[in-house]
Image (spheres, rainbow, N blue to C red):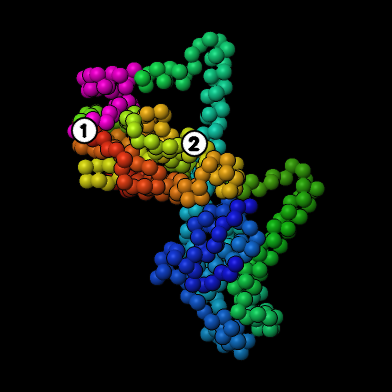
Amino acid sequence: MASVGPVIDENLPDTDARPQQPDWVDLVNRIQRDDPQAMEELYQVFTRGMRYYLCRQLGPQDLDDRVHDCFLIVAQAIRRGELREPERLMGFARTIVRRQIAGHIDSAVTNRRQQVDLDTSAPVPDGGMNPEAAAMNRQQEQLAVSVLKAISRRDREILTRFYLDEQSQEQICQDMSLTETQFRLLKSRAKARFGELGKRRLSRRNVPVY
Amino acid sequence: MEATFEDHCTDDALELYALGRLGGKHTEALEEHLLICEPCRERLDETDIFVRAMKGAAARLRLEQKTESFAARVARAFQVPAFPVWAASAACLCIIAVSAVRLQQPAPAGASIAVSLHAERGASQTVAAHHPLVLSLDARGLSLGKSAHIVLVNAGGTTLEQADVAPDNDQVHARFSRPLDPGDYFVRICRPGDADPLREFALRAQ
Ligand SMILES: [Zn+2]
């Protein structure tokens, strides 16, 4: 695993867009006193993030129900006084969501095993994406091909080692005699170029054809 | 490491998370932050797209490379010059032809044009507009080291394309895929990470 330095950076990305910082201890106290406003606040703070996380891990199926379940578990735990460190509410919420995901994956695996035992010809869900998403993926990959083809063979090897071969930054820098800054610069240039090409393609698509 | 609500995730952390290579403790902090931070969720989505595309592209190019080297081995076995030899010969011929006669013969639409640029004060090379360029730049006396940063800018100084390339003896080769509209352009050789040009060449597309 590569060492990543700080995971959180206070200079990124836009200071105005920073998330609100609720007073977790106060929020937990008010929920325990059955303050409906506090429950609403809890809902506002967490459900979008929960939805995002659950969707990322499990896909859009039954998403509303899953978010609802996670929220209820968090809310009930607070009410019952099971949250020992109210200032760690965010960590607690994350743990609940992770447990839900792990539980879902476990049951999905069990179900699939049982299905296979009953009928070996049962189709296995392929988890495939829809044609639009697949086409979008192909376009994005083509943009990345353009990025990689436009750089030197050596730079291409560096990026290939990192993104495809899953080599760590340290290993690549050592093998290729690179400084950490050069490595970062190469990655950020590639990303910027990818973004530029994507925007250009998007703008071309928006040009009306007469 | 502590995550606080006032801070945002770093690009490195988001990228390693998207690659599934962020360590446990870091993952915990990042995921807690993601729960409450919309901007970082959007950045993670963008990172996911980039990482997925780069993985796919790198795999595809590696496969192409393997296929090419296999073709080259087959060609050698049958004593037929492989494609890269023909390509190199063709590129050399193009460079000579363009240097000698400049634009007497317009290249077919969309085809790359090989252009040799020499370090002569006041000299401007004329190339055909609307074609990608394969540039060979005179890098004599620049002591570039292992890498050079080549930048193509328009007359207003706006960067149109750039690439990091490995110098080849006293030359630097760069391919710019963006076809140029008629006008004046400049090609700059810089050190990687340094915007100040070491040498600049004038180019006129017409
Ligand atoms: Zn953030």
Residue at left offset 56%, top offset 48%: A169
Residue at left offset 37%, top offset 21%: B91
Residue receiving disc 2: A154
In the image, residue A154 lies at what x, y percent? Answer: 49, 36
Residue receiving disc 1: B121
In what element is the residue under mark 2?
helix
- Residue furthest right in the image: A117
In this rendering, which labeled residue sits more in front, label 2 or label 1? 1
Answer with the quarter of the image where residue B187 lies. top left
Q: Is mark 1 within 8 Å of ligand 1?
A: no
In the image, residue B22 lies at what x, y percent? Answer: 61, 56
Span of residues in magenta? B93-122
Residue at left offset 34%, top offset 17%: B93
Name the side, left or right, on which A46 lies relative to A108: left
Instruction: Say whether residue B120 is visible.
Output: yes
In the image, residue B10 lies at what x, y percent? Answer: 50, 60
- Residue sitting nearer the eye, A88 or A73: A88
Crowdedness of circle 2 by 10 Å Cα count: few (<14), some, many (20+)? some
Chain of the residue displaying label 1: B
Quarter containing the C terminus of chain A: top left
Q: Which kind of residue does numbered mark 2 sit on?
A: Arg
